[in-house]
Image: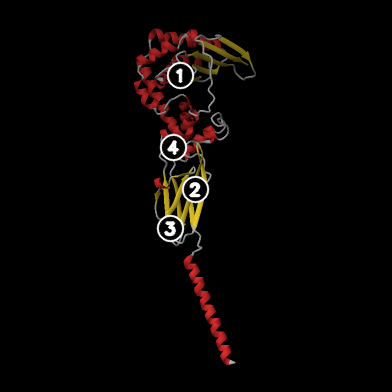
Amino acid sequence: MKFYKFLILFFILIAFFMSINLIELQSISKDNTPLVIKIITPTKSQDYIISNPTIKASFYSKNGINLNSIKLYVNNKDVTNKAKIRKDNLEYTPDKKFKRGTQIVKIIVCDKSNNKESLEWYFTVGTPIYKTFKGNFIDSENINNICYEQFENELYKNMEDFEDNILYDYLNDENIIKRIYEEEPSSIVKEKIEQTMQVSQSLYCIGIKDNQIKCKDKVKKHIAVEIILNLLFGKSSELYKKLYDDGTIYSTPSLDYEFSTTYAHVLLTGQSNTPQKVYDSFKEQINKFKQNGINKDDFERIKKKIYGTYVKEYNDVTDISRMFLADYFKGINSFDYLEEIDTVNLEYTTQILNDLFKTENMVLSVVRK
């Protein structure tokens, strides 16, 4: 009886040790420890990416990574050979810039125990400009905020990145609607227009039509026009002091030169109970400058003032985004203003005064109270 008990116990012990060895053998042949892949950059679903971002991901397994097993696919194309693969991470920068839109990335990794893991994610190249109607729509309510965010997050390190990723693709999209405009006549339609509305003070707007739209030196011309406007009707000008002292005007008028690829004009806007007097005085001042010439000392003083204004615009991120955005639509690099201002001399400014500030191209618009 004791012999049978001993025999049963013996077989139980043998079965126990065999089961332990079998478990250990299975654990050696296949390790079920999870293989982990982590996204570094661009993150999953990230938007507003520059067009050639560096894709980075890391991976880990306690059994070690089989580097020969790693596969990287970008937009369903195998780019493994172009990626920098290390023992615990990989890095890939595309040779060419991505087209705007969604980019899909997939990584496949195996460890030395043949555990296999894959991870797929996407990110978007471009800005909210492209999100609604491809090539045809800009969200006017948030476009300045878009640019502000790009600068604030330092996604665009230089002017080239800003141009390429904010507007280049948009302006060169084959799906953009090509707008064809009628040829603009050189003459004005009507010299004066007037209407009555509920305003506290009468408003005036003096416009000067510029027929020389296709100008090679757009920046240089713009600077010269700003100098002339400040000399004619700026806060330190003779005309401003005269009209302010006799109560014709109450504040410095807004002085602007607006231009694009299809139009260009000078605008002076302000408040006055006698807009016609302002208009006539402004024309007289133009003729006076043409007859007597521009004072050299006044020219240099205003030129320095304009330069200071340009530099000051770079103190604010919002001003920078607004300026770069507006200038790009005009085909201008905003940094050119700081360089071109040195090329604007008295002779060139006088030429712009004679060519642009013509009384036959001037109009007056009045809104009376």
Which amino acid type is shown beneath numbered disc 3?
Answer: Ile
Q: Earlier in the sequence, mark 1 or mark 3?
A: 3
Residue 65: give its label: 3
Graded by Cα atoms within 10 Å as few (under 14), some (14 to 19) or many (20 or more), the crowding at tag 1 reads many
CB atoms at circles 1 and 4 under 8 Å apart? no
Disc 1 to disc 3, C-alpha distance? 71 Å
CB atoms at circles 4 and 3 under 8 Å apart? no
Query: Residue 234 appears at what percent x and percent y?
Result: 45, 19
Secondary structure of the residue carrying tag 1 is loop
User: Residue furthest toward the bottom?
Assistant: 1
CB atoms at circles 3 and 2 under 8 Å apart? no
Q: Looking at the picture, tell me which residue is in the foreground, 144 or 213.
A: 213
Q: Is residue 369 above or below residue 90?
A: above
| Residue with the mark numbered 2 | 106
Query: Residue 260 appears at what percent x and percent y?
Result: 48, 21
| Residue with the mark numbered 1 | 234
Q: Is residue 96 above or below residue 327?
A: below
Query: Residue 194 appears at what percent x and percent y?
Result: 60, 12
Q: Looking at the picture, tell me which residue is in the foreground, 271 or 245.
A: 271
| Residue with the mark numbered 4 | 97
Q: Quadrant of the N terminus?
A: bottom right
Disc 1 to disc 2, C-alpha distance? 61 Å
Q: Earlier in the sequence, mark 3 or mark 2?
A: 3
Residue 206 visible? The answer is yes
Q: Is residue 13 above or below residue 102?
A: below
Mark 1 vs mark 2: give the one in front.
Answer: 2
Disc 3 to disc 2, C-alpha distance? 17 Å
